[in-house]
Amino acid sequence: MMMRSQVYGTMMLLMFLMALTDNNNSAPTPNFAPFFIGLTVATIGMTFGMNSGYAINPARDLSPRIFTAIAGWGTEVFT
């Protein structure tokens, strides 16, 4: 379940970034784009952060889990 939520969070972040920065999509003015991107990251972090510790990127969270599994904690790190 944890990896799935990170994939969804990453997917939503990329969709919002592409929608906000596309000039053909009525993009906001360059002054407001950083505000909306920060608001998007904060919103995704607040909704999925309780499950994965604010790790929106699965590549950032998967390798430490694999390391701790190899180090002796077993498969409990993936639950």
Image: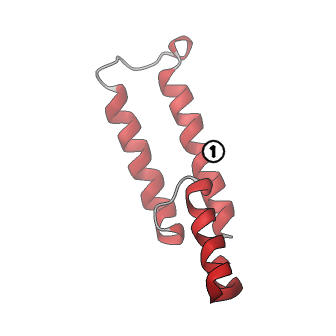
Residue found at the far front of this picture: 71
Check the image and tell me how it is coloured. Answer: secondary structure
At 53% from the left and 71% from the top, the residue drawn is 51
Vertical comparison of 32 with 63: above or below: above
Q: Is residue 79 visible?
A: no
At 47% from the left and 68% from the top, the residue drawn is 53
Q: State which quadrant residue 29 falls in.
A: top left
Report the front residue among 70 and 57.
Answer: 70
Q: Position of residue 34 (x, y in %)?
A: 34, 31
Q: State which quadrant residue 33 falls in.
A: top left
Vertical comparison of 68 with 41: above or below: below
Q: Position of residue 30 (x, y in %)?
A: 34, 18
Q: Position of residue 1 (x, y in %)?
A: 69, 70
Q: Position of residue 50 (x, y in %)?
A: 47, 70
At 59% from the left and 35% from the top, the residue drawn is 15
Q: Which residue is mark 1?
A: 11
Q: Secondary structure at mark 1?
A: helix
Q: Is residue 64 visible?
A: yes
Give the number of callouts. Answer: 1
Q: State which quadrant residue 32 falls in.
A: top left
